Image (cartoon, coloured by chain):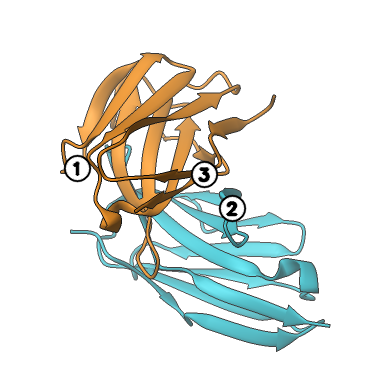
Amino acid sequence: ETGVTQTPRHLVMGMTNKKSLKCEQHLGHNAMYWYKQSAKKPLELMFVYNFKEQTENNSVPSRFSPECPNSSHLFLHLHTLQPEDSALYLCASSQDPVNSGQGYHNEQFFGPGTRLTVL
Amino acid sequence: KQEVTQIPAALSVPEGENLVLNCSFTDSAIYNLQWFRQDPGKGLTSLLLIQSSQREQTSGRLNASLDKSSGRSTLYIAASQPGDSATYLCAVRRAGYSTLTFGKGTMLLVSP
């Protein structure tokens, strides 16, 4: 496997289900991200992890719960979702400096996404 | 709050044409700007990254420019091909943050 992989690629779930999205990066990066892409809206950042520590939470509802056990893996745990949560969920990774704000941040590489449908 | 606007929202051209996609952003305090390509239902492919101190970057038939002071970037595609058909997204990275702010994209269709 190369680059950034995501599983599953497609997921259909009911509002009472609990499911998890998985992301794995094979690039040796130290930062990972979850984005949400809804129809007709720009990509929205959800969470950022740098060296396994969550550094940003973009006012995401608690029904979305991220987990980053190591710098190569990122999960998004889903529970009691709403139909409006249906979207393409994209994972990305990058090699960022240790101290945010110093030096240039390198480009982000994206996975293929998980198409989520909530019934 | 940073806002990114991409014009046009959609563009249809015949094969072989040179074309320009536009991106503007409201806050010039950026670290870099990145252009992506997204095929329908797929993830994003990074095309070009321009650091805030740079004026342009080139990769093959693609050339991206950055005018940070005016808050603008353009993506120039030379000799367009049907395989270039996709949505092109512009994203800016705020100085000191990991956050990328995206535009809504330009949907490009290149017909044979």
Q: Residue B42's mark?
A: 2
- The amino acid beneath tag 3 is Gly
Give chain A's shade.
orange
Percent from the top left, x then y, of residue B6? 43, 73
Name the chain letter of the residue that bears numbered label 2: B
Element type at marker 3? loop
Q: Colour of chain B?
A: cyan
Seen from the viewer's position, the closer of residues A1 and B36 is A1
Residue sitting at x 70%, y 87%: B13
Quadrant position of residue B21? bottom right
Query: Measured from the top left, where is residue A105 in percent x and y?
Result: 42, 35
Name the disc covering residue A60, or none.
1
Q: Which residue is drawn at 36% across and 62% down?
A: A42
Instruction: Name the residue beneath numbered marker 3.
Output: A113
Is residue A51 visible in the rendered image? The answer is no
- 3D distance between C-alphas at marks 2 and 1: 23 Å
Alpha-carbon span between mark 3 and mark 2: 6 Å
The residue sitting at 46% across, 37% down in the picture is A91
